[in-house]
């Protein structure tokens, strides 16, 4: 698992060896004394509780930007539904071919195609902690996800309409990778050019203010039941502000209380 680096301390016998488990980048390492190899390995597997979260919010609310910060600071895998869709389209999988027909028309991919495309990818991630960005967008997707795994946290970004319009007016993307820039907030090194590949950036048609109002109306309709679903589960955390840099410390504080809490539980278990 990416945030859980295990290494054995050398120079000791197998029955005496300690394991150092680091749950997240920068977190204090948890040292486990290995009295009996088999039982403690089993214990460690149980203790290595994985962290699973989703991030929701309207277009332009900063899901991608904040997900990158979370992934970087807490060592979680950032799973983007948009990236999965693009990968499947590029690989011409059956779900990818179907998804492409909807995306070309500027539509959301239907739930059954989206879950067929995404859930197998989550199965590949069973050993990792992750943050899922862009899924679920509908109640049907939230229910499908719920039957596949237990979530620890659902982050909900609540950003004023005028801020969304302003951000998307300045959003430029690199379509093959999904990399996102903003001419004010995080501009590319050379205007209109992707930093990594040197390829041209584009502005999406549906980031125009006229298109955004319709997208937002649709978002509100489909997101409300998802938000209610996570609220009822007691895992919903909503953040409201106009600036990512002001939201970020609050999200960071929330996650640092959640991720070490798992570590503390594990430490208790190791002493019994
Ligand atoms: N959970 C989903 N359900 C349905 N369609 C999806 C989902 N996730 C992605 N898609 C499809 O893939 C496309 C690209 O997704 P991506 O999240 O990268 O961009 P987006 O829709 O412009 O999101 P945002 O503006 O919120 O960043 C979407 O426009 C949509 O057609
Ligand atoms: N001005 C400004 N732009 C931001 C801020 N946070 C994110 N952005 C930009 O706003 C746009 C939308 O952010 P993004 O992360 O793509 O949002 P998403 O659609 O929810 O994934 C991108 O161009 C970001 O670079 C912010 O606090 N201020």
Image (cartoon, rainbow, N blue to C red):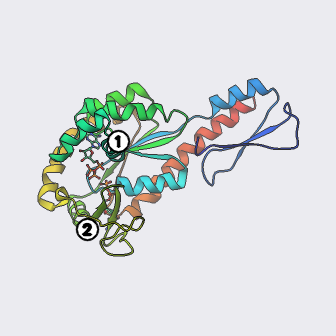
Kind of element beneath mark 2: loop
Residue 202 as seen in the image, left or right of residue 36: left
Q: Which mark is residue 170?
A: 2
| Quarter of the figure with residue 26 | bottom right
Say if disc 1 is inside 8 Å of ligand 1. Answer: no
| Quarter of the figure with residue 85 | top left
Q: Earlier in the sequence, mark 2 or mark 1?
A: 1
At x 51%, y 55%, the residue is 72
Residue 235 as seen in the image, left or right of residue 20: left
Say if disc 2 is inside 8 Å of ligand 2. Answer: yes
Task: Report crowding for label 1: few under 14, some 14 to 19, many 20 or more residues within 10 A (C-alpha).
Answer: few
Residue of label 1: 91
Viewport quadrant of the C terminus: top right
Task: Report crowding for label 2: few under 14, some 14 to 19, many 20 or more residues within 10 A (C-alpha).
Answer: some
Q: Which mark is residue 28?
A: none
Q: Is 127 placed above or below 63 here? A: above
Q: Is 198 placed above or below 3 here? A: below
Residue 194 as seen in the image, left or right of residue 222: right
Q: Is residue 54 visible?
A: yes
Residue nearest the viewer, comparing 3 with 199:
199
Please state the horizontal and vertical placement of residue 98, each as a whole percent of the image: 23, 36
Q: Are marks 2 and 1 in contact (CB under 8 Å)?
A: no
| Quarter of the figure with residue 183 | bottom left
Direction bottom: furthest residue: 190
């Amino acid at each position: 698992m990416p945030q859980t680096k295990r290494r054995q301390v050398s120079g000791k016998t197998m029955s005496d060896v300690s394991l150092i488990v680091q749950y997240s980048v920068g977190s204090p390492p948890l040292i486990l004394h290995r009295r009996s190899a088999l039982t403690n390995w089993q214990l460690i597997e149980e203790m290595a509780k994985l962290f699973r979260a989703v991030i929701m919010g309207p277009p332009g609310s900063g899901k991608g930007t904040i997900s990158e910060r979370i992934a970087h600071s807490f060592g979680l895998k950032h799973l983007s539904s948009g990236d999965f869709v693009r990968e499947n389209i590029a690989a011409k999988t059956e779900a990818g071919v179907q998804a492409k027909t909807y995306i070309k028309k500027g539509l959301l991919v239907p739930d059954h195609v989206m879950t067929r495309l995404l859930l197998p990818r989550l199965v590949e991630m069973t050993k990792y902690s992750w943050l899922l960005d862009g899924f679920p967008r509908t109640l049907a997707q939230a229910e499908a996800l719920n039957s596949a795994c237990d979530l620890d946290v659902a982050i909900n970004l609540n950003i004023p309409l005028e801020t969304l319009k302003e951000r998307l007016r300045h959003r430029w993307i690199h379509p093959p990778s999904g990399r996102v820039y903003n001419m004010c907030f995080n501009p590319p090194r050379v205007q209109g050019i992707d930093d990594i590949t040197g390829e041209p950036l584009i502005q999406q048609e549906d980031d125009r203010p006229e298109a955004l109002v319709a997208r937002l109306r649709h978002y509100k309709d489909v997101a409300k039941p998802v938000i209610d679903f996570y609220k009822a589960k007691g895992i919903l955390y909503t953040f409201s502000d106009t600036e990512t840099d002001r939201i970020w410390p609050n999200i960071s504080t929330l996650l640092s209380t959640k991720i070490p809490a798992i570590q503390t539980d594990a430490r208790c278990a190791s002493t019994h």
